Image (cartoon, helix red, strand yellow):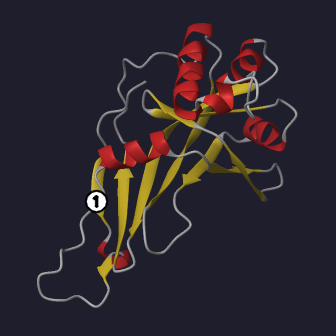
Amino acid sequence: MTPKRPTTELDARYSAALNPRPGAESVTATDWAEAQGRLRAAEVFWITTVRPDGRLHVTPLIAAWHDGALHFSTGPGEQKAKNLAGNANCVLTTGHNSLTEGVDIVVEGTAERVTDPARQDEVIAAFEAQYGDHIVSPEGTFYGFGDSIRKGNDLLFAVAPGTAYGFGHDGQVFSHTRYTFTDLDSSRPSMT
């Protein structure tokens, strides 16, 4: 499901060097490769879904970037699963809680269930690589994660970005990058 490289553009309206000085570097867009690296390294994400009455629901979760999509799981009775059953549009966000370092990443897309057992195993392996002992150790917070998905006790979703944003900040330079994914690879494997 690897999407083609997105169109990347810096939004100058929200990008600026504060107190620019001679020789200071100019504001540049955050490269998509860097954004993907940050998605792979992140431990906590926030998902926003839409309730049937239009109110938003936001909650933290773990997610893994694999094969061009963010993946997450949830129990079938949880609010986000109920919301996604009626409206699959969602937003996943991760980043630093600081004005002086980091890049915050926002991924907008449509959640699709991953039901193919081979694909599930690939994604479970990505979670295990990203979260290590939190998932693979019997003492880990999410131990049994893979078995719960394989048994159908938890649902696995993939969100390929339709649009994503990178908000860079280092205390002096702030940038707003937009990534637009208009042409997904038509040879991508099915999630089901």
Q: In the rendered view, tell whether residue 10 sits above or below residue 20.
A: above
Q: In which quarter of the view is residue 37 placed?
A: top left
Looking at the picture, how far across and down is residue 85, in whole percent? 76, 34
Q: Secondary structure at mark 1?
A: strand
Q: Position of residue 58 (x, y in %)?
A: 73, 55
Q: Amino acid under label 1?
A: Glu
Is residue 106 something one can see in this rendering? Answer: yes
Q: Residue at x 19, y 74 (%)?
A: 26
Between residue 184 and residue 98, name the one nearer to us: 98
* Pointer 1 local density, CA inside 10 Å: few below 14, some 14–19, many at least 20: some
Q: Along the line of sight, which residue is nearer the eye, 60 or 79? A: 60
Q: Quadrant of residue 109?
A: top right
Residue 79, placed above or below residue 104: above
Residue at image x 44%, y 51%? 164
**In the image, residue 103 above or below residue 14:** above
Left or right: 152 as drawn, with respect to 123: right
Considering every residue shown, the one lying at the far left of the view is 23
> Is residue 192 among the parts visible in the rendering?
no
Q: What residue is at 43 percent from the left and 26 percent from the top?
A: 67
Query: Relative to residue 190, is residue 92 depicted above or below?
Result: below
Q: Position of residue 65 (x, y in %)?
A: 49, 35
Residue drawn where x is 39% and y is 43% of the image: 36
Quadrant where the C terminus is found in the figure: top right
Position of the N terminus, as image quadrant, is: top left
Question: Relative to the observer, which residue lies in front, 123 or 77?
Answer: 123
Q: Which residue is mark 1?
A: 9
